[in-house]
Image (spheres, grey):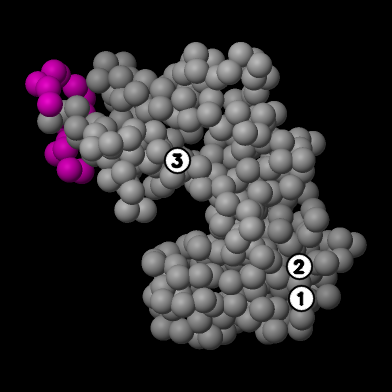
Amino acid sequence: MDSQKPYVIGVDLGGTNTVFGIVDAHGHIMSESSIKTHDYKTADSFVEAGIMCLKPLVEQVGGIEQIAGMGIGAPNANFYSGAIEYAPNLSWAHDGVVPLAQMFSGRLGGLAVRLTNDANAAAMGEMTYGVARGMKNFIVITLGTGVGSGIVINGQLVYGHDGFAGELGHVTMVRGKEGRLCGCGRTGCLEAYCSATGVAHTAREILANTDRPSLLRNKPAEEIESLDVSIAASQGDEMANEIFQFTGKILGEACADFAAFSSPEAFIFFGGLCKAGDLIMKPVEEAYNQHVMPIFKGKAKFLVSGLMNVNAAVLGASALGWGE
């Protein structure tokens, strides 16, 4: 990859939409456009549509010779192989291996293309443009529909031997029959409790097992989302605050365990739940300090992503385009 060239392409490949953006070295998204991921039945037709979407964006910055590289954040993405492998939510990739990086590179004149999963892309984005600039050891934890993580040690993302390391959202926090069923098929995973989905699940459980008054009762239980809990907590609702205390305690305990294997400079949190601010972050830090080994206490920062107000997924993916 040629770091002398002024722009890279960032691609956020999601289950519903795929967004393409042109990004400069300062992390400014110069232009972007999107296509519907599920409008295409084959990987070839998806790539063809992506190229057509990208063409005017690239022309706006002077052509492909101005592009240093391309980064793609995608589900079930293997950094080593450049392929999406058996992605259950992508109709054209759920039953096989799609060499997506190679396919885009071939259509872009041999441009260097890399891909990784969305949480690793978020970590790259923080290290390149965000609050982790200058850090060499940190963990990004994405709190969205699920819980993802990107682990950086000695300035390098951790991929493991097969390209799929760093699934901290699937460490077991509650063992045995009491553990909640997780989307991965296991029980008791961190994701089942500390994702936006998990927060809503906690709210419904508490509402079903108590008759205490709460603003959350103003909405049918099955329609409650994490945002409703956040709004109620910000208005002083006792039950909603207890939900965040419960969620933060589990997340803080998990971070205390994570510190034992990588001793990060910082835990960086990204995603909609972070907008709850101290409602979630204070119990996280309190639980961390209570459970972390004494040798690690007081050493790690707890930060919220610096990329929350931009298209962070595109920005994070674009960081791969600059190379290492």
Left or right: 248 as drawn, with respect to 264: left
Q: Percent from the top left, x then y, of residue 109?
A: 76, 83
Q: Percent from the top left, x then y, of residue 93?
A: 45, 75
Residue 55 visible in the shown view = no
Please tell me in which quadrant of the rendered image residue 224 appears.
Answer: top left
Q: CA distance from mark 3 to mark 2?
A: 34 Å
- Mark nearer the N terminus (1 vs 2): 2
Label 3 sits on a secondary structure element that is loop
- Mark nearer the N terminus (1 vs 3): 1
Decide: is 76 above or below 154: below
Amino acid type shown at disc 3: Val
Q: Percent from the top left, x then y, of residue 106?
A: 70, 84
Amino acid type shown at disc 2: Gly
Q: Nearer the viewer, residue 302 or 139?
A: 139
Q: Are the residues flagged by discs 1 and 2 in contact, CB closer than 8 Å?
A: yes
Picture residue at 78% right of the left edge, 59% below the top: 322
The residue lying furthest to the front in this view is 176
Q: CA distance from mark 1 to mark 2?
A: 6 Å
Please tell me in which quadrant of the rendered image residue 174 appears.
Answer: top left
Amino acid type shown at disc 1: Leu
For the magenta stretch, what is the residue range? 209-223
Q: Percent from the top left, x then y, of residue 176?
A: 28, 36
- The label nearer to you, 1 versus 3, is 3
Q: Which residue is mark 3?
A: 171
Picture residue at 33% right of the left edge, 39% below the top: 188
Within 10 Å of disc 3 (Cα), the crowding (few <14, some 14-19, many 20+) is some
Find out whether residue 212 is within the magenta segment.
yes
Q: Nearer the viewer, residue 313 or 62?
A: 313
Q: Which residue is mark 2?
A: 69
Q: CA distance from mark 1 to mark 3?
A: 37 Å
Q: Which residue is mark 1?
A: 111
Within 10 Å of disc 1 (Cα), the crowding (few <14, some 14-19, many 20+) is many
